[in-house]
Amino acid sequence: MIFLRDHHFRQADSLDFSTSWRTHLEKCSLLSHEGVVRSDILNRDKETDAFLATDAVVFLHSFDGANRSDWIKWFSEESGRFPKGHLVIVSTEGGIIVEETPRIHGCYWRPGDFLPTSGNEAALEFANDLRAGVFRPELLKPRAIPKYVVAYALAIHYGVGDARLTALRRSADQSYEQLHSQALSLLSTKKQPLTYQRVGLPKRELFEPEAAIQNESESVRFKAMRNLIDVLREDL
Amino acid sequence: MSDYAETFALPCRAASLRGQLKHSYLTNTICLKTQPDRLAVSMTSDENGIPRHKIIRSHIHELLELLGSPEQGFSPAQLLDQLSPFRELSVNERGSLKEKIHRQFAREFQLAPRKAQFEKTSALFLAELDAFLSHPLTKVGMEKVQAAARILIGELENLPKGIWLWEAVSNKKISS
């Protein structure tokens, strides 16, 4: 696995390079033994076969949109000078911004998720299987918040609903189960008690997703969707 | 990509600047430096021909400008252009809704006091940085810059990491 991050590791900085990023990575036993950390700046002429073999998995956690675009474009090119592995965009902006392709994926995992003590079972399973030579992109599970749910919740919160609200609500209802299952899955990995109080939903609406969307009350439906969106966006 | 699985894109320039300033610059290139001469080298070394301290200054000014922007700031008004359900609205209709959302956002987000606070904190930081770079390099000067940087980091931590939707219910405040 390769982790890319903008850390300004260059020139005289290397004399005093002790960022929290590097320190944090070194605490991750998995990474200190098998991972590589480097700058997020793509240098097309210098990327080597060893760096980007077809089985490489590159986690890109960049704050620079231009660098991110460079990597996505490069991985999207069919005929490159070097073979390519998989690019995983780590999103910290409250949403995943990639369209999934066979070689480009999205996730929210940070290095700490790979610590044995992280409690992120999916991340640990992903790393263990990768070590055994098996790449399992289905475990990455990006926090994909359905656009109709966001649109519906925005419409209610900001009072922009009109005759179109009914259609918007119908589309949001169709996507609600996806939102619900993602949020519950995330909550269950955090080793915190999954309670309806914690999510701020009435008990029935939390554990029976259909109860939330079948509730006639617009406020209950809105509250359910808004709170689960908040769960998916928290700690990013 | 199927409609069901479609994710919503939230490119947010203000959030990118926030992340770069907090992690890449204030933390990595300032707070973690241990000697005044190394902090000076870090601030004067160039990135694409521009001294780093000028890039930091430019990022701070851009973020201040963007804080109140309905297009590239944290305002959810920009989602009316990004989310396809809203793109079905006419341009005029969308424009007036964007104004409405942005006004409400400015109120709920407490945009004006936040901006004033960020302006004040960043001005203090930049003044300390200027003083450090224009005087003989001292440990005291470095510590003043780092203290001001840490306060600014605190301000950045109070900003959202992406487009702001609403005041989230804090799960921590809810007893379980």
Image (cartoon, rainbow, N blue to C red):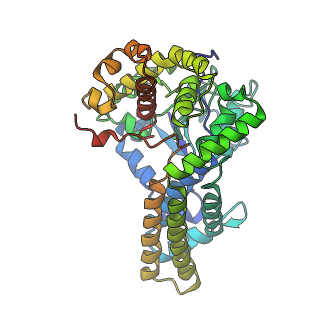
Rendered-image quadrant of the C terminus of chain B: top left
Residue A52: x %, y % from top left: 61, 32
Compared to residue A227, the image places residue B154 above or below, namely below
Give the side of residue A69 with respect to residue B108, left or right.
Answer: right
Between B173 and A119, the one lying in front of the other is B173
Residue at 60% across / 37% down in the picture?
B10
Between A39 and B85, the one lying in front of the other is B85
Residue B137: x %, y % from top left: 51, 83
Compared to residue A48, the image places residue B25 above or below, namely below
Between B130 and A135, the one lying in front of the other is B130
- Given the current orientation, which residue lies at the most extreme bottom position? B136
Compared to residue A91, the image places residue B67 above or below, namely below
- Given the current orientation, which residue lies at the most extreme front position? A163
Residue at 40% across / 33% down in the picture?
A231
Rendered-image quadrant of the N terminus of chain B: top right
Residue at 50% across / 62% down in the picture?
B113
Residue B133: x %, y % from top left: 57, 80
Give the side of residue A121 with respect to residue B118, left or right.
Answer: left
Residue at 45% across / 54% down in the picture?
B158
Residue B5 seen by the camera: no
